[in-house]
Amino acid sequence: MEKDIKIEIGQILLDLRKNKGYSQAEVAKYLEITTAAYQNYEAGRREMNYKNIRKLADFYNVTTDYLLAREPKKEIDPIELLPVDEWKKALLRLYIAMDSESRPEMIEIIKDIANGVDVQVVGKSESKIHKSQIKHQATIGELEDAMAREQANAKAKKNVG
């Protein structure tokens, strides 16, 4: 392998490992090699064998082509790396997109839903939030719609006040 390719592959390994939150020692243990050997992979000083390429592809849930820098680099979505279902990932994305004033209200809605009760969000003042009814079986779309209305009302209040 050319030196620049080994360095590119090493960078891919480094990025994947850091995004998953693993230490070099943890990955080396998984591969059943020394930490120093794994450090050499990331530094581009050592080539991986086929067995370790396959194991790392499985470990990081990527293709071997990706590990070998044969696919275009993809921006890694940290939420996708979380070991949670799609519903929770959608809630996290929605939460991140919200303004900081609306986030505590969303947390309360989620707590109520998690407790299996019907939730009625009522604003503390008439201009703050429209009333929303979100049932335990609410879909992601219904939740997104409710949050969008809350954000629009908050922006309208800021523009008036």
Image (spheres, rainbow, N blue to C red):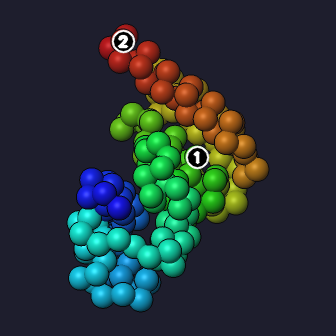
- On the image, the x and y values in percent for residue 62 come to 54, 59
Residue type at the position of mark 1? Ala
Q: Which residue is mark 2?
A: 159
Q: Nearer the viewer, residue 110 or 37?
A: 37
Name the residue: 32% across, 14% down: 161
- The residue at the far top in this view is 160
- On the image, the x and y values in percent for residue 105 come to 48, 43
Q: Quadrant of the N terminus?
A: bottom left
Chain-order first, disc 1 or disc 2 = 1
- On the image, the x and y values in percent for residue 159 come to 36, 12
- On the image, the x and y values in percent for residue 68 come to 44, 58
Residue type at the position of mark 2? Asn
Position of 130 compared to 73: left or right? Answer: right
Q: Under tag 1, what secondary structure?
A: helix
Q: Nearer the viewer, residue 144 or 56?
A: 56
Q: Which residue is mark 1?
A: 90
Q: Under tag 2, what secondary structure?
A: helix
Please tell me whether residue 103 is drawn above or below residue 6 in the rendered image: above
Q: Nearer the viewer, residue 55 or 155?
A: 55
Name the residue: 40% across, 65% down: 20
- Marks 1 and 2 in Cβ contact (< 8 Å): no
- Cα distance in 3D space between marks 1 and 2: 29 Å
Name the residue: 31% across, 77% down: 38
Which numbered mark, 1 or 2, is in the foreground of this view?
A: 1
